[in-house]
Image (tube, rainbow, N blue to C red):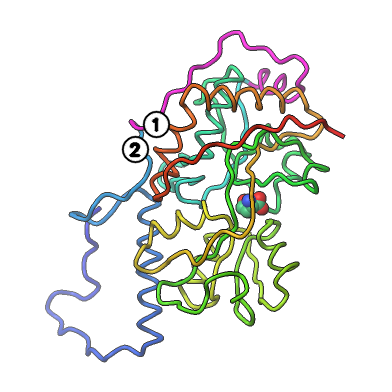
Amino acid sequence: MRELPPDQPPNQPPPPRATPHPARRRRALAVAVLAALALAAAGCGKEGSPPAKGPRPEALPHYRVVQGFDLPKSATWRKAKRRGRLVVGAKEDQPYVGEKDPATGRYSGFDIEIAKMMAASLGFDPRRISFRTVASANRETALQNGQIDYYVGTYTINDLRKRQVGFAGPYYEAGQSLLVRDEEDDIHGPDDLAGRKVCSAAGSTPLQRIEADYPKADPVSYDAYSICVDNLLTYQVDAVTTDDTILMGYAAKAPDELKLAGRPFSKEPYGIGVPRSDNALRLALDDAIEAHQKNGDWKKAYDATLGLSGVPAPKPPAVDRYAAG
Ligand code: GLU
């Protein structure tokens, strides 16, 4: 990327310099970090700087598209077949997990790879997926209204949600954790959040857990975690809480400014959301998850995406083919 020309015309004297006020300096730093995060997301860096870490296209596996696949009992699959495309819900601001490149509109990350594996097993070329960003709070409605065929986006399986949607999986198990500024010394776990502002996404299990189990904390919520991270960098909140997978991605993109604090304090098994009545689709996706774990695609996809934030591939959890009530 080319350097922008200086604001001042070349022959004018430079503006007077003063030692910036600490708060202003912190703000300037935060602005610089936010710009760096945005550049990293856009896949470009300053000339001469190391390339932004991100999935290298050549490291990503190719998934074998099952020919002649048929799933007549799934209304969702039949509709997608007629349309000639799958419409998949995802996240767009979660580095290494589900991220949209603002320049190209392309989605990447571990969840995106899972979505592609599923497409291949359902007989669709992964290039025939249209991804749609759906925030945590809107997932159930998007599936119930038929706006998406399935959803892959750090979506925790739980009994409450199972009353509204179906879940294939789990395909990964995360845990709730905390992200703080690098200089923060007083937050080591959720018990240290008393009187502190903690940010999370509306409609997420981590926000619900803070509200229910840590009543002394001061929760703040937005639609997306990236807004929480902006708020953390600009000193509006003291911590961001959600799954370690998501927080590790933000920390890896700004290692001098952000760090994870303490250990995970919940279990977040990730499922693929499907319309609740479509058991045929749910069970076909369960089969697909197992097949891609066995043939090595799952591990290759993890290594090329989420693995870049520093944690080696864990053993994937066992798929749960539950009986729909
Ligand atoms: N896994 C948690 C959830 O499903 C947090 C991540 C998210 O909001 O997507 O609520």
Task: Check contact, mark 2 vs mark 1: CB within 8 A.
Answer: yes
**Residue carrying label 2:** 56
Q: Residue at x 58, y 27 (%)?
A: 118
How far across and down, in percent of the image, does residue 2 sit? 22, 55
Residue furthest out toward the right: 325
Is any part of residue 69 visible from this angle?
yes
**Identity, as a three-letter code, of the amino acid under mark 1:** Leu
Residue in the foreground of this view, choosing between 246 and 41: 246
How far across and down, in percent of the image, does residue 137 sit? 70, 54
Residue furthest out toward the left: 11
Q: Residue at x 45, y 38 (%)?
A: 302
Helix, strand or loop at mark 1 = loop
Image height check: is 200 above or below 165? Answer: below
Q: Residues within 10 Å of mark 2 (few under 14, many from 20)?
A: few
Residue in the foreground of this view, choosing between 7 and 201: 201
Q: Residues within 10 Å of mark 1 (few under 14, many from 20)?
A: some
Residue in the foreground of this view, choosing between 92 and 195: 195
Taking the image as shown, residue 115 lies to the left or right of residue 47, namely right
Residue furthest out toward the top: 68
Image quarter of residue 166: top right
The numbered mark at residue 60 is 1
Is any part of residue 135 visible from this angle?
no
Q: Which residues are magenta?
A: 58-83
Distance from the alpha carbon under mark 2 to that under mark 1 = 7 Å
